[in-house]
Image (tube, rainbow, N blue to C red):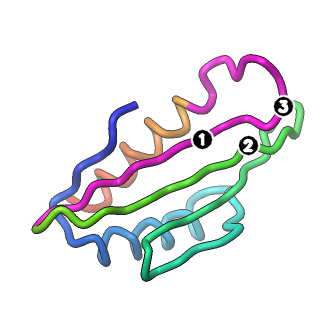
Amino acid sequence: VKPLVLNSSSDTVYKKIIDHITHNTSWKIVSSDAQLKFIEATEQTKFFRFTDDIVIEVQDNNPSSIVQMRSRSRMGQSDFGVNAKRILNFFAELNNSTN
């Protein structure tokens, strides 16, 4: 999945991501750094309750921002596309909220 480019400052995008995670997902933020614009979170899968790790980085690309995201399952050989779908859905939601 390619990084998402948004036409907003990295500070604005970082704040929107934190707000979106807090109010619109079942993710739990493990750590975040506003200065580095870095977020680590987890989400439990609904069926087997496995924990997946999520990392989001926002980079300044004046006047736009680049959002990079990784999602990885802790257990199993295959995630059946769950992690890629999570990233694509999150990017679509974030893109819609910033336009």
| Residue 54: x %, y % from top left | 62, 50
Q: Which mark is residue 88?
A: none
CB-based contact (under 8 Å), mark 2 and mark 1: yes
- For residue 75, the mark is 3
Q: Secondary structure at mark 1?
A: strand
Residue annotated with mark 1: 71
The residue positioned 78% from the left and 18% from the top of the image is: 77
Can you give x and y, in whole percent of width and height, for residue 68 in the image? 40, 49
Q: Residue furthest right?
A: 48
- Residue count near mark 1 (Cα–Cα under 10 Å), binned few <14, some 14–19, many ≥20: many
Q: Is residue 18 magenta?
A: no
Farthest residue to the left: give it: 63
Q: Which residues are magenta?
A: 63-83
Question: Looking at the picture, how far across and down is residue 71, in whole percent?
Answer: 60, 41
Residue at 47% across, 47% down: 69
Residue at position x 22%, y 56% in the image: 6
1 and 3 marks in contact (CB < 8 Å): no
Q: Specify the amino acid type for callout 3.
A: Met
Q: Quadrant of residue 45?
A: top right
Label 2 – label 3 distance at C-alpha: 8 Å
The front one of 81 and 53 is 53
Q: Residue 23, image x and y in percent?
A: 57, 68
Q: Which residue is mark 2?
A: 52
Kind of residue at disc 2: Asp
